[in-house]
Structure formats: C-alpha cells, structure tokens
Amino acid sequence: MAASDEMKKAAAEAALEYVENGTIVGVGTGSTVNFFIDALATKKDDIEGAVSSSEESTARLKAHGIPVFDLNAAGPVPVYIDGADEINEHGQMIKGGGAALTREKIIAAVAEKYVCIADQSKMVGILGKFPLPVEVIPMARSYVAREIVKLGGDPEWRQGVTTDNGNWILDVHNLEIMKPMELEDKLNNIVGVVTNGLFAARGANIALLGSPDGVKKYEF
Ligand SMILES: O=C[C@H](O)[C@H](O)[C@H](O)COP(=O)(O)O
C-alpha cells in the first residue's frame, strides 16, 4: 500500500473511537472515507446504521451489510466522519473533489460533531490552492462562471461529471481565500449555485491527520 494510503487508513481507523454504540453515523465520501467504511464494518452490530453523503458510499456501506437510513427518517446524528481536500488551522475546509459536496454539507449541518480524517498533506496555511468546487444547476453554468470571474476566480467546468443530484461542477482556480466565511456566503448568493465546497461556517470540530509519525489530533 502507498505511504499516503497507509496514513489515510490510520486516520480512518482512529475515527472509530468517535462512533458511539447504538447511534446513526454520518458517513462522508472519498478514498479516506472508504477506509473508514471498511473499519466501521467491524462495528456494524454495535451501531444502528449510517446516513450517507453519496451513492458511492451508500453502495460500500450496503456491501458491508451496514443499514443506510434516509436522512429525513434518521434521528440525531452525533458524529459525521469525512475527508477534506484542504483543511486550515481553524478546521475550515475545501471539499468536493469527488463531487459529493452538497450531500456532505447537509449531513455536516445535521451532525453534532464533524471529525475530519485525512493525511497530513491536506493541512494548509491558506485555503485555495486546491480548486474550489461549486455545484451548479446545469442551465446556470455560464452565468455562475461569469459571476465567479467577477469575484476574482478562474472557473473551469468539470466536464463529464454529473453529481448525485443531477447537477454540474465548476472548479474555481487561482483563489487565495483570506476570508473563507465571506467567500462561502458570496458564492451561495449567486443564483444557480446549489452549494460551494467551502466548509467554513460549519467546519470540522476535530481533525485526525495521518503522518509518518502516527495520527495527529487537532481540535478546533
Ligand atoms: O467530494 C468529495 C469529498 O469532499 C471528499 O471528502 C474529498 O474530496 C476528500 O477525498 P479523499 O479522501 O479521497 O482525499
């Protein structure tokens, strides 16, 4: 296994400690979360089940025999476990590299605690080197792109990708995000934007970052 995968796996397994018996676990999306789902399978008889942020995660959960609930039918979600494309020292993140940002943001909003799992390379000083994903209603793509240019970004259509919600993604390059909450709000205010990948207003509470020296824990 590649060293970065070892670090993701270690972070994912460390997150099991935050899963409470008898509860519904919020499950994110991505390569790090896949390790978490595999680890969660070892506890499947101790939990009620999961709510899932993507069709991909749902399929993996079900393949392990973990019950997946509709979020509308689920009660409290004490913890949400998910990865990140970038995370800063305040627990604010860029997410959506796998196009799952909208459902991820919804479950993150519902959950009491967000535990971010990643390898140490995701920790950055300033967010924005990773192109910021923005999910848009397809007919609004060009309009939203023009509005994003006015905000100083360089949007690129992620061609060939349709989200689980039937929408499209613009990846915004060349941003140096000094005020993440402000930009999150501004992008949300563009008509046609469904969600943007800045998780600033609702960031992580805890980050477990795999490193060559073991898993490092950060609290925000
Ligand atoms: O849409 C995808 C998600 O936001 C992922 O959590 C994010 O891209 C990190 O994925 P990975 O664990 O594969 O780096």
Image (cartoon, rainbow, N blue to C red):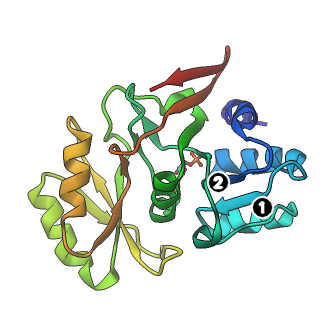
Quarter-of-image position of residue 42: top right
Q: Which residue is mark 1?
A: 61
The reply to whether discs 1 and 2 touch (Cβ–Cβ < 8 Å) is: yes
Q: Where in the figure is residue 70, as x and y percent of width and height?
A: 64, 72
Q: Tag 2 or tag 1, which sits nearer the N-term?
A: 2
Q: Amino acid at mark 2?
A: Val
Q: Residues within 10 Å of mark 2 (few under 14, many from 20)?
A: many
Q: Where in the figure is residue 170, as x and y percent of width and height?
A: 33, 65
Q: Amino acid at mark 1?
A: Leu
Q: Residue furthest top?
A: 213
What residue is rendered at 21% in x and 49% in y? 183
Q: Which residue is mark 2?
A: 27
Q: Where in the figure is residue 86, as x and y percent of width and height?
A: 44, 39
**Which of the image's four quarters has the N terminus?**
top right
Q: Nearer the viewer, residue 97 or 3?
A: 97
Counting every numbered tag in the picture gives 2
213 relative to 194, above or below: above
Q: Nearer the viewer, residue 204 or 143?
A: 204
Residue 134 visible in this rendered orientation of the protein: no
Q: Is residue 140 left or right of residue 36?
A: left
**Which of the image's four quarters has the C terminus?**
top left
What residue is rendered at 24% in x and 80% in y? 140
Residue 68 visible in this rendered orientation of the protein: yes
